[in-house]
Image (cartoon, rainbow, N blue to C red):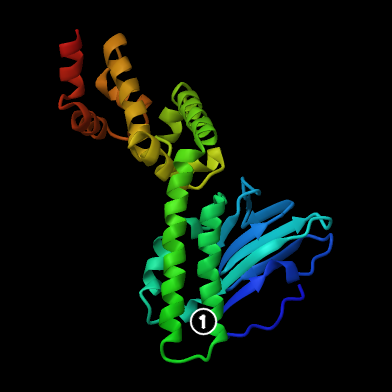
């Protein structure tokens, strides 16, 4: 793509305006961590098999050994920068392990990060420090200083993602509405009894977002994880069946996707402090 040779063997900051593209889709395998800060991008980006849902978002993150592709409108002039970090650069630093906890590097993630002008300046300032450091004479302090700046950038990105859950209320509440409708349709069908209680992974896939993004969204807006949200819906359905039907406890357990009635009784009592039979008797 016409990118200049790297000035450091394991870390680079690339000016996106220097990338040469044509009208053909570009696809490649990343062997490093990639952090893109992009402007004026018009086209589609795909990470693995999923498209980023907010192409207008400013920052995107790619983990090593993942397929990344994009196609762009040649009339648009791409600007911004791309930070590339080889995993070997992180060896013997605290980031070697801690970088794995940042959810936005997940292969399943497809949510780009929006930034305010103030946030963008902060990110670009940190990027410039990284670039200046490896432009200087490499010494025994270089790796530690660059790694510290990368970690600072990741921590700010974590903060900005958390803020995004709150500020993007319209999009987030649309997801909540879709989640509620998805679970209602599932629970009102025969799938609950035949396929069991839906997993967090299956729910997120149906909503076309990552499991981590969904759980963090619910935690921020509702104070619940996805699993807790599903369990609350399941508990309400259990209470309805116990109070308005003559089904036995075992029949209700199987209809709700539990393999064993004992598992249902244990779940119900953990939520209400009553066994299903005690609840039914108390309700009546």
Residue 130 against residue 178 in the figure, above or below: below
Secondary element at tag 1: helix
Q: Position of residue 84 (x, y in %)?
A: 58, 73
**Quarter of the rendering occupied by the N terminus:** bottom right
Residue 201 against residue 194 in the figure, above or below: below
Choose top left, top right, bottom left or bottom right for residue 24: bottom right
Label 1: few (<14), some (14–19) or many (≥20) C-alpha neighbours in 10 Å? some
Q: Which residue is pictured at 37% across the width and 82% down the height? A: 92
- Left/right placement of residue 218 relative to residue 189 reads left
Q: Which residue is pictured at 19% across the width and 7% down the height? A: 284
Instruction: Say whether residue 83 is visible.
Output: yes
Q: Which residue is pictured at 63% across the width and 53% down the height? A: 49
Residue 162 against residue 99 in the figure, above or below: above
- Left/right placement of residue 274 relative to residue 1 reads left
Q: Which residue is pictured at 33% across the width and 32% down the height? A: 231
Identify the residue under disc 1.
133
Instruction: Say whether residue 203 is visible.
Output: no
Q: Nearer the viewer, residue 36 or 227?
A: 36
Q: Nearer the viewer, residue 195 or 271?
A: 271
């Amino acid at each position: 793509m016409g990118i200049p040779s790297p000035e450091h063997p394991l870390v680079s900051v690339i000016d996106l305006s220097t990338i040469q593209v044509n009208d053909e889709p570009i696809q490649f395998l990343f062997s490093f961590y990639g952090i893109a800060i992009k402007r004026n991008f018009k086209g589609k980006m795909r990470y693995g098999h999923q498209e980023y849902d907010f192409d207008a978002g400013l920052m995107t993150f790619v983990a090593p050994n993942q397929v990344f592709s994009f196609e762009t409108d040649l009339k648009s002039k791409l600007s911004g920068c791309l930070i590339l970090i080889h995993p070997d650069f992180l060896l013997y630093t605290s980031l070697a392990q801690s970088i794995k906890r940042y959810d936005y590097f997940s292969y399943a993630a497809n949510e780009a990060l929006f930034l305010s002008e103030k946030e963008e300046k902060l990110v670009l300032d940190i990027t410039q420090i990284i670039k200046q450091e490896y432009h200087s004479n490499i010494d025994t302090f270089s790796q530690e200083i660059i790694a510290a700046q990368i970690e600072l950038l990741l921590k700010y990105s974590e903060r900005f993602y958390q803020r995004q859950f709150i500020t993007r209320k319209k999009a987030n509440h649309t997801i909540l509405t879709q989640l509620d409708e998805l679970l209602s349709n599932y629970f009102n069908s025969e799938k609950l009894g035949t396929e069991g209680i839906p997993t967090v992974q299956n729910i997120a896939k149906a909503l076309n977002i990552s499991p981590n993004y969904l759980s963090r969204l619910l935690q921020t807006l509702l104070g619940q994880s996805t699993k807790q949200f599903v369990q609350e819906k399941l508990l309400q359905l259990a209470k309805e069946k116990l109070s308005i039907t003559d089904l036995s406890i075992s029949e209700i357990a199987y209809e709700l996707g539990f393999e064993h009635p004992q598992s249902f009784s244990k779940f119900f009592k953990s939520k209400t402090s009553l066994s299903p039979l005690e609840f039914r008797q108390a309700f009546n």
